[in-house]
Image: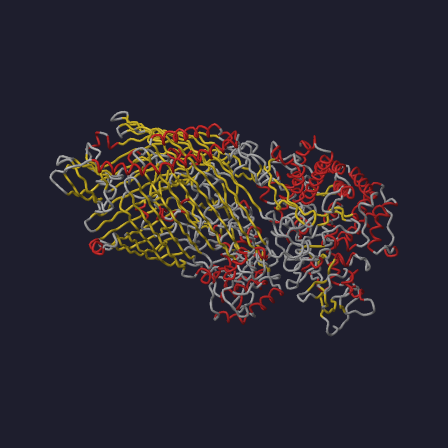
């Protein structure tokens, strides 16, 4: 008996002691499910994942998948949000009276900062990594590209913050390295200067599209230069300041026009990388088909895929052409065109029918004309994707910047620098107009040569070119034209409703028969295929001639001019930009909870 | 280095196991030796006899020894023995574990009957205090106990329910009425602000999470709850929130006994929320649709409900209360327990089998459990003891329930309350057929359809293996080693059919969510115990020990979308590969994760007793935990407790009516390591959630977590002070104890909200401090003690005052005074105020001020509009969605008198902490009848009835039914359906109005929803009858036969208007208790059962 026990006990006691010896290690663990910061950036593949995670903050419902693209940038003289006013939802933003408790304001703001933090981690760690210091040339080139992408993405996040909220807290180091994370607002000009410098550095680090075989969903040198030009113009332009609370132009504007000019010029010298797409519709078809457009006119678009609210978009489901729920497509309708926007286009401008869908697809999958006020943004059409049924995520990408924008920014900067357009600037503007008329120079009219007139031409051209791409509101703000244009649009809407002035010949109703809808037809062909009742031999005149006195039999009528009533222009629930106030509503309020967690952060601008 | 350590540990465990098995074999040889002894010694006088306990039950396995010799025998299973002794002067000694040893001189008797007295100290009054046991008399700290005797009459399916209200200072609350609902146990209020406040559960010496939910009451021998840090500090880092020590039933040295107990019964919903009937509903909708004057909207109403003149039809439409459809069933329950136990002096065993089938009152909900528990104890020789305990249970919890941790949109009770209260006309098949338009318009889905479309099966398998051996190295020095292995497997299969919101976001196709996880925990503790009787007065008990707890776990999740539209849940679970993504869509990849946790500890305890009069216990424990940065990973937790047994003083010895008087005082520290691991460094997660689509696929991305890393994260530390008094009077007819305590907790980890501009929402910081103060009183006694009638009662009451002492500092060095927290039932609501100097759980909102009357307005006759008079505050932005204010709208108090209702007008509206709570149990016995009643109560706690807010607010939705409160609303339409605007007429129309117009703004908290949650609940009443012994003796089949009927939750006296005042459905965040939102309604359970002992 005793023999059995003693050794056992001894062993137990010895084992007990041994366990103790190694106990420091016993509690020092690594979690195989997670990667530490050091390990991450010492590995090119992991660093690539870290950069991917920065890109990830562009998309999803709170990024350009929905809120940043389709909710915050509304409304302007092109489009507005559908539905009735509520200060706590998307419509409150579009009507320029969003409460600071409006949840639409919360997550996009936070997601942008999350993207900034992810970029900050890369920007700090990549140059310190061993791969960066001692890796192969290929590895170093990759790490450089990653660093450039991180710098450029951070710039885009800050730009998005500034244009919606003005001055915001700025940090260019990871939060863990900050002495004080309770950051107060930094003046936007300071942030702009930093990100413009960063973008300059980034464009040196990232190769051209063809050099790096870069998809449009990823940043290339051209895209970074274009973003730099765009941000430089924003820096040079007006914005709502904190003190005094007024629209004031950025200091040293000319310096920034020059940056924009130089960057655009550099891009325009590389037509092999990006060029104007002769087929305007192809640009928007391409984002529905996850491919580059024919000439890589879209220099950077935000990739969407995965069928979820984080990595996919709701473009084409939330907004775009309205397809009845019962049709195979089911979606669209969250954004409505301002009816007068239709009449800003020349009759033969191909962009009109791509940009505005003034019809809808009914439950029988027929096209039927829609009442004014219910027209939608036609650059997004669920029926252009392969996805049918009630899916909300259609993998439609969001275009951030196009070559057409580069041409028009070039023209604009040139005009400012030279106090009037140079020949090259005139050419750049005309290049965009020519494309809109299929290259028919006889239709584009005469381009003005005076500085102001040329500027006005650019203001108009950008309205026509970029409608529905969420550029307009911010353009108008940087030009300090937002109030003027809102008032002008209200007046135009009144004329439209009354059938006076420019709208004297616009029909009050249009008679049509529902007809089969074929999404494979081009946007223009679809419009031409409408079975509308018209006189004469040109179907397209129906939108420009008064309606017949008697209703033709067999046709349904749609409220055309009649679609706009007094409520549409001025009412508590529906009025266009009803609550806009100059020198206050150019910016959005910061969401309550974000203010509450930082005592150094102030609301400002009278909110 | 690390690898070596593991190998050594593994080796050690293996060694111990081998050792345990090797010990079994020598024991058999020992037995044969005994027999040989018996054969060898030839004696003269033969004596036969029988040994029983005080109840006359025969005791087998009693050692009968002739004094001064090695001659001895053991009684058989009938308690009989036969021994041959030297002569008449021989003395026999009878010894048996748990009984007092008896010596009897034989004299001239040939046969003797022995009745053994139970060794009370050994059984009833032993209290487990960590790694050792002491008698209650020697106890120096605050420990509350419940034993099997007290809960045996409580036919409930979880041990947690059985102990509810029975332990002073231990608050047991069930979040809602669903089968298998989470039970929250708080010892003295809970110390942490944001971290887990669950106590540590130790089952037979090893750590088992949520043990009281896993075990059935029938398996439990005793539950001891260590409440003050003097007793919990022996568990160091895990002891700050109390320690619940559970001993499961083991065998006894007695003839094998078979015991069956079982019961069957029916559950039924207790009360329902009163909702509008069809006619009331349609009239309300009429107002809603017509108020704005929008013609389109009015037409929609006519299309859907008919013209105003048609509305009288609805008076005759049968009222369909969906709560009846969904929760109305008689839910059947059956529970069976079979227990076989017995043993001899050397070996005892117990085997329990348990089977439960419980239906929930809600469709498709229920609970099933099968459990087997085997416990075996063996005494190899006088030095060696060894035991194993194996327990396996399989639970299945069905039903997605009504509440979810998500916000308003994902909670389900709404559908049963708000769905239109009739079927038809034209909508008859709403119940069976999903109406897509209705869903978008109303945010509702047919509740019956939904209950059949949201299927959840939650399987939980728990394996507990536990073995120990102890060895008496020398007299009074014992080595004990315990090894435990606990494995918790959980598989949750959820199915979201095509009408659910989840499916609606995924092409109207069903979605399956499969989650599997396994957690394995190996506990090993080794202790050396030395009981040193220095002399007759001084005694010193010393304990040193070492313990390791090693936890490893894995989890995986598979989320499959786009299953065929009409697939059944079981088919979907069985073949997820049937999913077909629409063109261009891909499935989410499966995800896996690993959890790891290690604790290594060293501890020691010294217990000193001077003549049983002056007692002192000193203990120290050092813990190292992998949760923290290794530099902060170790902490030491000392404690001291003292007691004075005053009754043993000379001056009290002659006081006859006083049987016991003991004064206790203690001071101790303990910690809380129940925090998320790896907070100290930035770690990256690679996940497709952080991914990006460079092309037609999502490239996963590596991103930091949502909390900013904090390298300085360390322990939460608790210091607790306790004084107590134990007393017993009048021959123990009345006994009790009173305890008062102050618990201060420091370095509390706050999941501090940090500026979101950092890129993170939160960071864990050791910056908080709380204090809990309280008094607990326990009184027990025998009220009546007659021959045929006995009445005993136990009463406990406790009060705990919780106070936040610090919420840390902001970076400018100022103390943070408060912050607002969101319960999250609505996105964007900030309805709790976490404030220094105040308790956790303060509801924060507006003060209801009725509704606006005509007098509050200036009426413009020309435009027929009302405008608020100057000075009348406008609640437009706060409650009405920024719409214009009209007579009848909800009015809120303007606390800062600035004319507008805004954030500054919110105040604390009450809190969820009760002033006091407790329980009263009474047991009556009259002849063969027995009866017990158990009440529990809570006084002074407020409940945040969020249901009431939701069900009386219009917000964005029409066609939603409302609570009957809304019937008293302000009216804008007269009986002819015409809008009344003119002030005098409007005033006349509303002279009896009692309620505001359901607000059109987002749901907000205002004081209307804060209700008194005090209650007195008769949670259990049982009436039983046992067959008389005389009859049992004749039948010779049973030794005990009892039948009983029980009603659980028979009635609750409360002023609360919701389903049940105990509901608390938003407590995944400890800061937001007491919110009754979408809780599963509680049921009444009436059952009858039988206890049989063979």
- Specify how the rendered protein is coloured: secondary structure
Choose between A41 and B592: the one closer to the eye. Answer: B592
Residue B469, quarter of the rendered image: top left
Residue B407: image location, x then y, percent:
54, 51
Q: Where in the figure is residue B1041, as x and y percent of width and height?
A: 27, 54
Q: Can residue B991 be seen in the rendering of this structure?
A: no
Residue nearer the viewer, B95 or B1003: B95
On the rendered image, what quadrant is the C terminus of chain A found in? top right
Q: In the displayed structure, does residue B836 sit left or right of residue A330? A: left
Point out the image quarter for the N terminus of chain A.
top left
Q: Is residue B158 left or right of residue A385?
A: left
The quadrant where residue B308 appears:
bottom right
Front-lying residue, B173 or A342: B173
Position of A491 with respect to B332 (left or right) is right
The extreme left residue here reads B108
Viewer-proximal residue among B685 and B1058 = B685
Residue B669 % position (x, y): 41, 32
Residue A273, above or below A377: above
Which residue reaches farthest top?
A: B534
């Amino acid at each position: 008996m005793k023999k059995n026990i003693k050794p056992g006990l001894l062993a137990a006691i010895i084992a007990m002691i041994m366990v103790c010896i190694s106990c420091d290690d016993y509690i020092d663990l690594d979690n195989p499910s997670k990667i530490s910061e050091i390990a991450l950036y010492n590995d090119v593949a992991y660093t690539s994942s870290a950069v991917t995670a920065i890109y990830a903050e562009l998309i999803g419902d709170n990024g350009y998948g929905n809120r940043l693209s389709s909710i915050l940038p509304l409304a302007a003289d092109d489009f507005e949000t559908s539905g009735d006013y509520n200060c706590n939802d998307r419509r409150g933003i579009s009507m320029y009276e969003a409460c600071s408790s409006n949840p639409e304001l919360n997550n996009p703001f936070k997601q942008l900062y999350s993207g900034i933090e992810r970029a900050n981690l890369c920007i700090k760690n990549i140059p310190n990594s061993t791969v960066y210091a001692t890796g192969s040339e290929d590895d170093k080139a990759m790490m450089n590209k990653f660093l450039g992408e991180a710098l450029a993405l951070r710039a885009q996040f800050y730009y998005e913050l500034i244009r919606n909220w003005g001055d915001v807290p700025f940090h260019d180091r990871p939060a863990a390295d900050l002495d004080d994370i309770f950051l107060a607002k930094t003046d936007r000009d300071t942030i702009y200067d930093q990100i413009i410098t960063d973008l300059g550095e980034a464009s040196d680090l990232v190769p051209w599209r063809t050099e790096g075989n870069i998809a449009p969903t990823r940043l290339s040198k051209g895209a970074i230069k274009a973003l730099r030009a765009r941000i430089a113009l924003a820096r040079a332009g007006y914005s709502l300041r904190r003190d005094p609370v007024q629209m004031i132009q950025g200091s040293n504007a000319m310096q920034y026009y020059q940056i924009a000019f130089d960057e655009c010029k550099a891009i325009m010298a590389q037509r092999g990388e990006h060029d104007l797409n002769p087929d305007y519709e192809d640009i928007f078809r391409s984002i529905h088909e996850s491919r580059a457009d024919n000439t890589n006119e879209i220099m950077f678009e935000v990739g969407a895929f995965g069928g979820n609210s984080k990595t996919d978009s709701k473009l084409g489901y939330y907004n775009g052409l309205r397809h009845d729920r019962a049709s195979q497509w089911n979606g669209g309708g969250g954004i409505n065109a301002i009816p007068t926007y239709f009449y800003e286009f020349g009759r033969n401008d191909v962009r009109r029918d791509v940009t505005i869908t003034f019809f809808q697809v009914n439950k029988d999958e027929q096209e039927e004309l829609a009442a004014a006020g219910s027209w939608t943004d036609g650059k997004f059409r669920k029926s252009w994707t392969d996805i049918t049924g009630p899916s909300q995520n259609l993998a439609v990408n969001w275009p951030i910047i196009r070559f057409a924008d580069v041409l028009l920014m070039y023209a604009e900067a040139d005009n400012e620098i030279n106090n009037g357009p140079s020949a090259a600037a005139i050419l750049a503007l005309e290049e965009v107009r020519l494309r809109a008329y299929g290259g028919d120079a006889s239709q584009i009219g005469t381009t003005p040569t005076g500085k102001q007139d040329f500027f006005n031409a650019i203001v108009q051209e950008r309205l026509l070119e970029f409608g529905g791409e969420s550029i307009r509101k911010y353009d108008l703000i940087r030009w300090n034209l937002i109030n003027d244009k809102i008032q002008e649009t209200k007046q135009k809407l009144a004329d439209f409703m009354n059938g006076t002035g420019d709208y004297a010949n616009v029909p009050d109703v249009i008679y049509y028969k529902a007809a089969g809808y074929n999404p494979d037809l081009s946007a223009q062909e679809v419009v031409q295929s409408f079975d509308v009742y018209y006189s004469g031999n040109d179907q397209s005149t129906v939108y420009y001639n008064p309606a017949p006195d008697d209703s033709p039999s067999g046709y349904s009528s749609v409220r055309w001019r009649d679609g706009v009533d007094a409520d549409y222009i001025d009412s508590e629930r529906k009025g266009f930009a009803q609550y806009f106030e100059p020198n206050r509503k150019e910016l959005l309020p910061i969401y309550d909870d974000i203010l509450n967690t930082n005592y150094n952060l102030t609301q400002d601008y009278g909110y | 280095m690390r690898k070596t350590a593991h190998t050594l540990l593994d080796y050690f465990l293996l060694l111990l196991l081998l050792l345990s098995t090797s010990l079994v074999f020598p024991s058999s040889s020992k037995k044969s030796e005994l027999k040989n002894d018996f054969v060898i010694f030839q004696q003269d006088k033969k004596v036969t006899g029988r040994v029983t306990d005080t109840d006359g039950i025969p005791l087998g396995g009693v050692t009968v020894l002739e004094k001064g010799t090695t001659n001895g025998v053991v009684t058989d299973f009938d308690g009989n023995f036969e021994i041959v002794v030297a002569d008449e002067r021989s003395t026999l000694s009878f010894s048996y574990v748990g009984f007092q040893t008896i010596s009897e001189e034989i004299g001239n008797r040939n046969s003797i009957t022995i009745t053994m007295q139970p060794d009370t100290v050994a059984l009833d009054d032993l209290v487990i205090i960590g790694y050792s046991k002491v008698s209650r008399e020697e106890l120096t700290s605050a420990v509350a106990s419940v034993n099997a005797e007290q809960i045996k009459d409580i036919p409930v399916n979880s041990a947690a329910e059985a102990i509810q209200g029975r332990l002073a200072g231990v608050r047991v609350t069930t979040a809602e009425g669903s089968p298998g609902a989470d039970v929250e146990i708080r010892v003295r209020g809970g110390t942490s602000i944001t971290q887990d406040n669950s106590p540590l559960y130790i089952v037979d010496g090893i750590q088992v999470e949520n043990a009281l939910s896993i075990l059935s009451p029938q398996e439990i021998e005793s539950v001891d709850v260590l409440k003050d840090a003097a007793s919990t500090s022996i568990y160091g880092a895990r002891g700050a929130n109390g320690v619940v020590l559970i001993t499961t039933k083991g065998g006894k040295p007695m003839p094998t006994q078979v015991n069956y107990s079982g019961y069957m019964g029916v559950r039924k919903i207790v009360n329902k929320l009163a909702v509008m009937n069809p006619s009331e509903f349609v009239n309300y909708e009429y107002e809603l649709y017509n108020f704005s004057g929008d013609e389109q909207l009015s037409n929609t109403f006519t299309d859907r409900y008919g013209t105003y003149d048609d509305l009288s039809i609805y008076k005759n439409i049968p009222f369909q209360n969906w709560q009846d459809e969904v929760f109305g069933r008689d839910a059947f329950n059956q529970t069976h327990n079979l227990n076989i136990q017995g043993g001899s002096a050397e070996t005892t065993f117990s085997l329990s089998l348990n089977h439960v089938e419980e239906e929930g009152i809600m469709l498709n909900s229920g609970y099933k459990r099968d459990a087997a528990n085997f416990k075996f104890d063996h005494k190899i020789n006088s030095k060696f003891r060894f035991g194993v305990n194996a327990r396996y249970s399989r639970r299945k919890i069905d039903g997605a329930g009504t509440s979810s941790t998500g916000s308003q949109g994902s909670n389900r009770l709404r559908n049963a309350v708000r769905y239109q209260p009739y079927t038809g006309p034209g909508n008859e098949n709403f119940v069976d057929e999903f109406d897509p338009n209705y869903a978008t318009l109303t945010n509702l889905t047919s509740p019956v359809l939904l209950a059949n479309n949201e299927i959840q099966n939650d399987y939980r398998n728990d394996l507990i293996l536990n073995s120990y051996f102890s060895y008496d190295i020398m007299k009074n020095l014992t080595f004990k080693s315990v090894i435990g292995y606990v494995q918790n497997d959980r598989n949750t299969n959820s199915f979201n059919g095509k009408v659910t919101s989840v499916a609606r976001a995924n092409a109207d196709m069903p979605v399956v969510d499969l989650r599997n996880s396994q957690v394995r925990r190996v506990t090993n503790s080794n202790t050396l115990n030395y009981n040193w009787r220095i002399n007759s007065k001084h005694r010193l008990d010393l304990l040193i020990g070492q313990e390791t707890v090693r936890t490893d776990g894995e989890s995986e999740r598979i989320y499959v979308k786009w299953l065929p539209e009409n697939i059944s849940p079981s088919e979907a679970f069985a073949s997820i590969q049937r999913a077909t993504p629409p063109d261009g869509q891909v499935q989410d990849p499966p995800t896996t994760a690993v959890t790891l946790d290690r604790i290594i500890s060293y501890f020691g305890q010294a217990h000193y007793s001077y003549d049983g009069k002056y007692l002192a216990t000193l203990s120290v424990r050092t813990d190292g935990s992998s949760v923290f940065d290794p530099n902060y990973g170790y902490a030491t937790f000392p404690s001291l407790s003292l007691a004075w047994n005053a009754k043993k003083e000379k001056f009290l010895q002659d006081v006859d009516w006083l049987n016991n008087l003991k004064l206790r005082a203690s001071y101790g520290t303990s910690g809380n390591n129940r925090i998320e691991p790896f907070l100290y460094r930035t770690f990256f997660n690679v996940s497709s959630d952080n991914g990006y689509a460079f092309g037609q696929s999502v490239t996963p991305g590596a991103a930091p977590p949502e909390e900013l890393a904090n390298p300085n994260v360390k322990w939460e530390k608790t210091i607790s002070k306790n004084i107590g008094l134990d007393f017993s009077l009048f021959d123990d007819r009345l006994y009790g104890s009173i305890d008062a305590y102050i618990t201060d907790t420091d370095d509390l980890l706050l999941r501090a909200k940090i500026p979101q501009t950092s890129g993170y929402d939160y960071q864990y910081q050791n910056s908080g401090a709380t204090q809990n103060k309280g008094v607990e009183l326990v009184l027990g006694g025998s009220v009546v003690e007659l021959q045929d009638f006995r009445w005993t009662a136990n009463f406990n009451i406790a009060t705990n005052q919780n106070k936040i002492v610090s919420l840390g500092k902001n970076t400018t060095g100022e103390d943070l005074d408060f912050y607002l927290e969101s319960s999250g039932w609505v996105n964007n609501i900030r309805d709790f105020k976490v404030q220094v100097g105040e308790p956790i759980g303060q509801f924060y909102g507006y003060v209801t001020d009725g509704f606006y009357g005509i007098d509050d307005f200036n009426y413009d006759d020309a435009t027929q509009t009302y405008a608020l008079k100057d000075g009348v505050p406008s609640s437009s932005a706060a409650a009405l969605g920024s719409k214009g204010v009209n007579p009848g709208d909800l009015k809120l108090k303007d606390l800062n008198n600035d004319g507008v209702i805004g954030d500054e007008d919110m105040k604390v509206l009450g809190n969820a902490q009760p002033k006091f709570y407790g329980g009263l149990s009474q047991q009556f016995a009259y002849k063969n009848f027995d009866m017990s009643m158990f009440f529990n109560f809570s006084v002074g706690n407020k409940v945040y009835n969020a249901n009431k807010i939701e069900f009386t607010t219009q917000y964005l939705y029409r066609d939603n039914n409302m609570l009957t409160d809304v019937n008293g609303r302000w009216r804008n339409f007269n009986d002819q359906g015409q809008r009344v605007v003119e002030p005098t007429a409007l005033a006349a129309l509303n002279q009896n109005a009692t309620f505001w117009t359901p607000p059109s703004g987002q749901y907000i908290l205002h004081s209307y929803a804060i209700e008194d949650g005090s209650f007195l609940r008769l949670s259990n009443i049982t009436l039983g009858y046992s067959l008389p012994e005389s009859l049992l003796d004749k039948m010779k089949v049973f030794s005990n036969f009892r039948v009983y009927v029980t009603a659980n939750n028979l009635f609750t006296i409360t002023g609360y208007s919701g389903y049940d005042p105990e509901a608390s459905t938003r407590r995944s965040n400890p800061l937001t208790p007491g919110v009754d939102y979408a809780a599963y309604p509680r049921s009444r359970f009436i059952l009858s059962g039988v206890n049989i002992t063979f």
